């Protein structure tokens, strides 16, 4: 099965309920922030990563950045900050538009999707937005694409805050998020 999907999904948020909710996947962001410093307007470069995004939401020890995709046929629609138990603290980015090329193979009991996507993400506060390219591979059950067994994505991004900063870097999404051992079931 091959398909081309172009979609605009402004503020599409999947229900965040415990039963039947799409799983969370671990996110690693690594980049460089370019900004000017007054009074001399010198362009400065500094590292940018998960801690920068998590700290915008919380100071909770052990909070993490995660991604959520609704099915094996989707790219992440949300980048979230969660506490160590997986409770959502804030939404860092929402997928606002994408253009996707998707190819799937199945042996009848398992399906593998490979997705190439041009994406645009924006934060709900309107401070940062930007474009990127993601290459994703997902596995699941062919009869129910919402059951995701594995998910791995690598890509690049450029984010912008007008007249403030430009951030360029890489994003890796892989592995299921696992709540801390002392969390209630």
Image: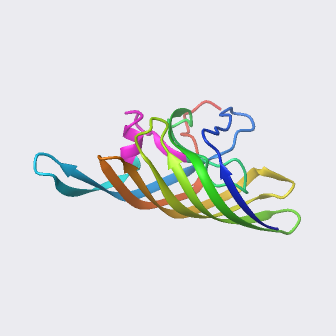
Magenta residue check for 77: no
Judge from the rendering whether residue 114 lies leftward or rightward of residue 61; answer left or right: right
Residue 143 vs 59, above or below: the answer is: below
Name the quadrant of the N terminus.
bottom right
Image position, residue 112 (x, y; %): 75, 65
Q: Residue at x 20, y 57 (%)?
A: 43
Going by the image, does 127 lie left or right of 8? left
Residue 154 vs residue 183, the one in the foreground: 154
User: Which percent across, then down, holds residue 90?
Assistant: 50, 34
Residue 64 falls within the magenta-colored stretch:
yes
Q: Is residue 104 left or right of residue 180?
A: right
Answer whether residue 185 is visible to the viewer in this image: yes
Give the colour scheme shown: rainbow
| Corner quadrant of residue 30 | bottom left
Q: The C terminus is located in which quarter?
A: top right
Q: Is residue 177 visible?
A: no
In the image, residue 106 above or below residue 96: below
Instruction: Name the residue at 29% across, 46% down.
Output: 164
Q: Which residues are magenta?
A: 51-66
Asked if residue 151 lies left or right of residue 31, the reply is right
Please provide percent x and percent y for residue 152. Answer: 61, 61
Q: Position of residue 82 (x, y in %)?
A: 51, 37
So how many labels did they put on this image? 0
* Foreground of the two, 157 or 8: 8
Residue 54 sits above or below residue 17 on the image: below
Which picture quadrant has residue 153?
bottom right
């Amino acid at each position: 099965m091959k398909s081309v999907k172009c979609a605009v999904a402004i503020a599409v948020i999947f229900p965040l309920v415990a039963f039947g909710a799409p799983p969370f996947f671990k996110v690693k962001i690594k980049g460089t922030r370019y900004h000017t410093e007054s009074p001399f307007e010198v362009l400065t470069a500094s590292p940018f990563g998960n801690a920068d995004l998590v700290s915008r939401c919380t100071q909770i020890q052990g909070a993490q950045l995660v991604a959520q995709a609704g099915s094996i046929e989707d790219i992440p629609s949300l980048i979230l900050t969660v506490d160590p138990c997986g409770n959502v603290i804030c939404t860092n980015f929402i997928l606002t538009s994408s253009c996707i090329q998707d190819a799937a193979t199945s042996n009848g009991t398992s399906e593998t999707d490979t997705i190439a996507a041009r994406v645009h993400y924006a934060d709900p506060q309107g401070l940062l937005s930007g474009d990127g390219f993601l290459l994703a591979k997902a596995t699941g059950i062919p009869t129910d694409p919402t059951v995701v067994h594995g998910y791995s994505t690598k890509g690049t991004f450029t984010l912008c805050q007008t007249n403030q900063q430009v951030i360029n870097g890489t994003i890796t999404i892989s592995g299921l998020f696992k709540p801390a051992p002392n969390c209630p079931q």
